[in-house]
Amino acid sequence: MKKLKRVSFASALAGLLLVSPVMNSQAATTTITKNEVLTNSTKTTLNTVLNTSRLATGVSVRDAKTGKTLYTYNAKNMMSTASNMKLLTGSAALSTLGENYRFTTTVKTTGKLKKNGTLMGDVYLVGQGDPTLHKSDLTNFAKALQAKGIKKINGHVYGDESWFDNRYLAPGINKTDSLTYYGAPVSALATSPNNEYDTGTVVVYVKGLKEGKAPKVAFSAQGHLEVVNKAKTVEKGEVSSIKISRKYGTNKIYVTGKIAEGAKTDKWLSVDDPSKHTMTIFTKELAAAGITLKNPTYKLAVTPKKGTTTVITDKSPKLSTIMVPFMKLSNNGIADTLTKTMGKKVFNKGTNADGVKAIEQYATAHNISLKNWAYIDGSGLSHQDKVTAEQMTKFLYHTQKEKYYKSLHTSLPVAGANERMLGGTLRYRFTTTDMSNRIVAKTGSINNVRTLSGYVTQQDGDPLIISVLTGGSSSTALIDSVVTMLINDEQNLTAKKK
């Protein structure tokens, strides 16, 4: 069983009292009381900053303890969620599948095993979308077959990807995105390079050898990928200019440019066909285990309902554990996998469309207005995924009461925390002593859209729930400015001095 190394969140999260919600007028005019969380001065400053900004912006701020709205600015406008969509997808998955849910991959055989070690039947590798499946697991599967005494497979080696449909790309993933690690295809038989679980991807490594020679190209797992190496090694110390890319619609990896002798570089890329990639690796691992294949070319087929024998079953880490790289690193592949898995569980159809229906079912049951939150996928990669800031903070407030809240909250990036699996996408933001560890939130980033929604602790300890959605720029400056003003609210600083 695979295990993801978990970091200790106790020290970084100490003092982060997370709770929720916001207020309803573009220009806040409520009279300030002695114990009010947000001052009129800060509200006025926020209005000035937001009114003079050229960006489309929606802001909602709530008291995390009471759910009271403290400030809003265009909070009822539908804005692109970007990866803030993952807050809903993750919550729906924790509720629908359960915190202890594990993905399963199974190896089965048919037919009888002769005394000479020949299996007079077939081998099936049956996937259920495990985003943590690794090449080492495929090695273990081959060794398990070998341990059963199998020396030759007289039938075929099959891959069963039928748990999901074979539409590997979610809506909204365009041609360019599909070539990247963040737009990688998802299947029921995809593999990941490491414990960050970027399913459907590989890492390509390039190393400069002797000057004048082609550099060495290696993979985390090559599978069915082919290399077109047009690069050249140049003199040691010279500036490298290597380009690593995959040609759209093919399995060809192109390496061009130059790299200095002894220099190294790498790049994460998507594979074109995740099931084909996994099955190619698996058949190679069978051969490496000393198992002869009468029919070396694998096929894709549904496993027979009867007449099979289970050789080995591999289970992924718990969903609560997978949530950490999913949310910390904003992993789109896991989002798409969870979406299809929810569709499979709720409607017995492992499709994106049915997964979206399952998320909608969760949303309806939790009083989330589908008029204020629209989506076509689970990752937020599509510009068609939209939400109002008011709906987002309302959702985050009520989520605090859910039994799975701790798993959700633990999975969120922590501002200024250096550890990759703690700070995640916020580890390089809000890094000053007075700001770090005060923001636990989900970031969002797609073309000309930047978002941030989550939980904030003010200087005097008051907990807020915030959602800042922006469009028209790829900068986070406005978001960071708003969050800084909320944390350093004048009343809180004054109270702290007293």
Image: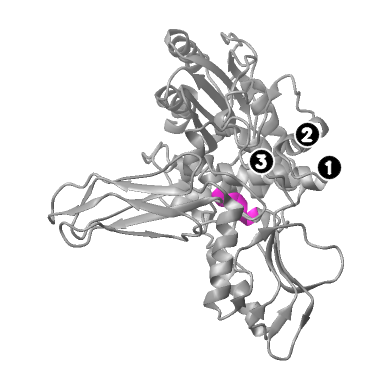
Q: Position of residue 12 (x, y in %)?
A: 49, 50
Residue at point 63% right, 43% down? 168
Name the residue that disc number 1 marks: 347
Q: Nearest the camera: 299 or 363?
A: 299
Q: Residues within 10 Å of mark 1 (few under 14, many from 20)?
A: some
Dominant secondary structure (helix, strand or loop) of the stretch shown in magenta: helix
The label shown at residue 236 is none
Name the residue that disc number 3 marks: 167
Circles 2 and 1: CB distance less than 8 Å?
yes
- Dot 1 lies on which element? helix
Which tag, 2 or 1, sits closer to the chain's start?
1
- Dot 2 lies on which element? helix
Give the side of residue 324 with respect to residue 415, left or right.
Answer: right
The label shown at residue 357 is 2
What amino acid is at disc 3?
A: Arg
Residue at point 63% right, 69% down? 295
Circles 3 and 2: CB distance less than 8 Å?
no
Determine the CA span between mark 3 and mark 1.
17 Å
Does 115 sit above or below residue 442?
Answer: below
- Dot 3 lies on which element? loop
Q: Quadrant of the C terminus?
A: top left
Q: Position of residue 405 (x, y in %)?
A: 69, 45
Q: Position of residue 30 (x, y in %)?
A: 61, 11
Query: What span is in magenta?
Result: 320-325
Q: Residues within 10 Å of mark 2 (few under 14, many from 20)?
A: some
Q: Is residue 490 located in the magenta-colored stretch of the structure?
A: no
Q: Position of residue 175 (x, y in %)?
A: 51, 32
Count all numbered tags in the image, as a single digit. Answer: 3
